[in-house]
Amino acid sequence: MLELNQLEAEVGGSRNALLAVKPRITVNSSALRMAVVGVGYLGQFHAEKYAALEETNLVAVADVEPSRARRMAEDFSCQACASHRELIGKVDAASVVVPTQDHCQVARDLLEAGIHVLVEKPITATLEEADSLVQLAKANNLVLQVGHLERFNPAVVAAREYVQQPLFVESHRLASFTERGTEVDVILDLMIHDIDIILSLVPFPLEDLRVGGAKILTPHTDIANVRLEFANGCIANVTASRISAKRMRKVRIFQADSYLSLDYAEREVELFRKLPEKGADGFPEIEYQQLPVADTDPLEEQLRAFAESVCTGAKPMVSGEEGRKALEVATQVSELIQQQGGRLGIGFRAKRLAP
C-alpha cells in the first residue's frame, strides 16, 4: 500500500473529503459492470472512480463487514454484498482491494467465475499464489491487472518517452512512521513500487542483488537498500524507509548524454541533455528542460486502463506476469536481509538470479 498521505494525494483527496460531497455517478447501459471487493480505505476510492467513469457502471461492492458495504452501497447507489462470491453472474470485472493474504483466494474465485480482475499490489502473498493466478487468467482468457499505481503517475508517464537505455538509477522512497502497513516489511510495503518502476524501465535480465536493511521500530525491516545489477550493466540503487523525518519519493535516471530527475510527489520531471556542439570553453553544452506533466488522476487512469483492457483484450499496463516479477524481486530482497540478521550497511549478501 502507499503511505496514507501519499495515497490521498494519488487518488484525489481524503476519505472525509470524498464522503463530504455527493458522489458523481454515471450510468451507461453499455458500460462494463464493475464491483469492488473490500471497501476499506483504498477500496472506497476504487468505488468512487468506477461510479464516475463513463466506461464503467459500479453495480456492487462487497466487504466482510456488512455495515461498511451497506454504507458504500448507499453512497454509490449500488448493491451491497457480504461476500465476493455473491458477485458471480452479476459483474464483468472487479477490483480486489483486500488484505494481501486474501488476494489469491478472492481473485481465484472471481477468475474461475469468468470475472476480469484488478488486484492491488503486491499481486499475492507468495510466488506460488501469483503463478496460480497468472495461469488461471491465461487459461480463461481473462484480464489480470496488478495495481502498481505509480505506473500511472503523470510524472512517470511524461518521463518514460525520454528513457532509452538507463545506465544508473538512484531511487529514494522515504516516509514518516505510521502503524499502517507495518504488518509487512518496508520492501513489500513501499520499495516494491520502485522495484516495479525500475523493472519496467530497464528491459534486461536482472543478474544480481546486494542488500542491506534494519528493524528499527517494528518486528519487520523498516529501512532497506538494494543494489540491482542488470545484464546490460545498468545498476539501480534503491532506498526505502518508513522511519524518515522527511518524506521523499524521487528517482534519478542516468543514460548516455542525458539525465532525468523525477519527483513522484510533486509530479515534476527535469531533463538534462548534452548537446552535440561544445561550448566556447571546449566543454559540452548542457540543455535543461522541465518536462510538461499532465494533470491526471493516477487511480482514475489505472481503472480506465483496466476497463479498456477488458473491452479490447489488450495486455494490461501492469500484467500479472509483471506483478509477479516485482513480487519475486521484493521477496528475494526481504529474504536476503533476513538471512543477514537485519544489519544495515554491513554484511551485504549477493544473490545471483537465474536468467
Image (tube, rainbow, N blue to C red):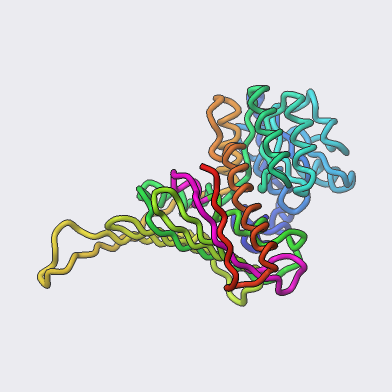
131 falls in the magenta region = no
Check the image and report above or below for 316 versus 12. above
- In the image, residue 199 above or below residue 350: above
Residue 255: % across, % down? 34, 56
Q: Quadrant of residue 62?
A: top right
Q: Is residue 240 above or below residue 52?
A: below
Provide the residue span drawn in magenta.
197-223
| Quarter of the view holding residue 57 | top right
Left or right, residue 150 beside residue 101? left
Camera-side residue of 116 and 257: 257
**Residue 87: x and y, percent?**
80, 30
Which of the two residues, 106 or 328, is positioned nearer the viewer here? 328
Vertical side of 71 occupied by 345: above or below: below
Q: In front: 190, or 300? A: 190
Q: Residue furthest left?
A: 280
Rendered location of residue 4, percent (x, y): 68, 62
For residue 312, side relative to residue 282 (left or right): right
Q: Position of residue 54 (x, y in %)?
A: 60, 34
Residue 86 located left or right of residue 152: right
Q: Residue at point 77% right, 60% down?
A: 183
Q: Residue at x 56, y 34 (%)?
A: 316
User: Quick one: 72 or 334, which is closer to the camera?
Assistant: 334
Horizontally, is 77 left or right of 187 in the view? right
The residue lying furthest to the bottom in this view is 245
Decide whether residue 203 is among the magenta residues: yes
Residue sitting at 60 percent across and 35 percent down?
Answer: 306
Quadrant where the N terminus sits is bottom right
Number of callouts: 0
Q: Residue at x 67, y 22 (%)?
A: 140
